[in-house]
Image (cartoon, rainbow, N blue to C red):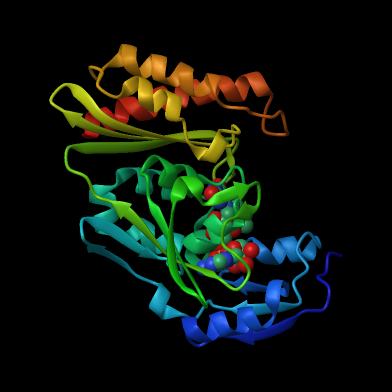
Amino acid sequence: MQVPTHVEYERASSVDEALEMLSRAGGEARPLAGGHSLIPMMKLRLAQPELLVDISGLTELSYINVADAELRVGALTRHAQLLDSAVAGERLPIVHDAERVIADPIVRNWGTIGGSLCQADPSEDLSAVLAALRATAVIRGAGGVRTVPAREFHAGPYETVVEPGELLVELRIPLTANTGSAYEKVERRVGDWSVAAAGAVLTLAGELIEDAGIGLTAVGAPHFCAPEAEEFLRGRRAGEEAFTTAGQIAAEHSNPVADQRGPEDYKRHLAAELTTRALRKAFERA
Ligand SMILES: Cc1cc2nc3c(=O)[nH]c(=O)nc-3n(C[C@H](O)[C@H](O)[C@H](O)COP(=O)(O)OP(=O)(O)OC[C@H]3O[C@@H](n4cnc5c(N)ncnc54)[C@H](O)[C@@H]3O)c2cc1C
């Protein structure tokens, strides 16, 4: 039987209180949001915090709204809420494409956006989505608030730039005109993690690509994105030729590893194919 080691538990009733509890325990405390990732990690003893600070009741961090041409999503927003959001679906279809294929309804009903990103799993879907969208993470600690580009949020597998004593509190996603987006994922069965997945965001100026964002997950793309493929697309005429070449460039710069979900060459092939498909769909939607 897998059981965690002894752990203290405190429930925070505000963000300020949570930050105070986290700082008091130094690096030995972990925030507990939905627990879908943290509790299994504790059972396997891959995480052994001395204190769990339960932030799941902090409704002040559960919201989706539009301000200053950005979609603002509180870190305690559940996957299911994001999937239900009409504004997210209309303005950012890449988000709904991804949310439809993240886990199952049980996980989506309780798992949070913040928990998902802070877990920093190399196969996590929203990290690729937010990298493609060039979102910004808002982090709060005793010293105040700081912002970090989504592309700089991960410090490595299962590591982020959120320091002990800090909380991720919000994601800010730019809402840009003349833009289409899409997410394409291959999974072994419904609800599973990605074998590989790609997201694309295209901003058009007539027939030309003004800007492109490409996010990749599960294929070892540095920072979940493909800057070389984005650079190739910028200023080019949108179309099949450009999308296919961009897919190949994205695959060349990814570093997949073989595991139970497939060999390296299959994942690299998927990186190219899914990037091309996501670009095609983003273009149709722009
Ligand atoms: C069966 C299953 C299938 C899944 N399939 C997929 C999938 O297909 N694609 C995918 O992308 N994900 C998948 N997931 C991952 C799932 O999305 C996450 O487990 C879930 O969203 C994590 O959110 P949580 O609120 O439960 O986080 P928790 O488990 O509570 O926390 C996770 C980590 O983040 C930290 N944390 C939480 N909130 C904050 C915060 N606000 N600030 C700082 N640190 C914080 C915690 O301390 C912990 O280290 C799956 C999970 C399961 C269990």
Res 101 seen here: no
Q: Position of residue 258 (x, y in %)?
A: 71, 28
Q: Is residue 9 above or below residue 157?
A: below
Residue 284 pos. (x, y %): 23, 29
For the point 21% across and 55% down, the residue is 69
**In the image, residue 64 lies at what x, y percent?**
32, 65
Q: Residue at x 69, y 67 (%)?
A: 39
Q: Residue furthest left?
A: 206
Q: Nearer the viewer, residue 242 or 184?
A: 242
Q: Residue furthest top?
A: 241
Residue at the image position 58 percent from the left and 22 percent from the top: 268
Image quadrant in which the N terminus is located? bottom right
Tell me if residue 253 can be seen: yes
Q: Classify 105 as above or below 9.
A: above
Ligand 1 is found in the corner quadrant, namely bottom right
> Would residue 47 be found to the left or right of residue 59 on screen?
right
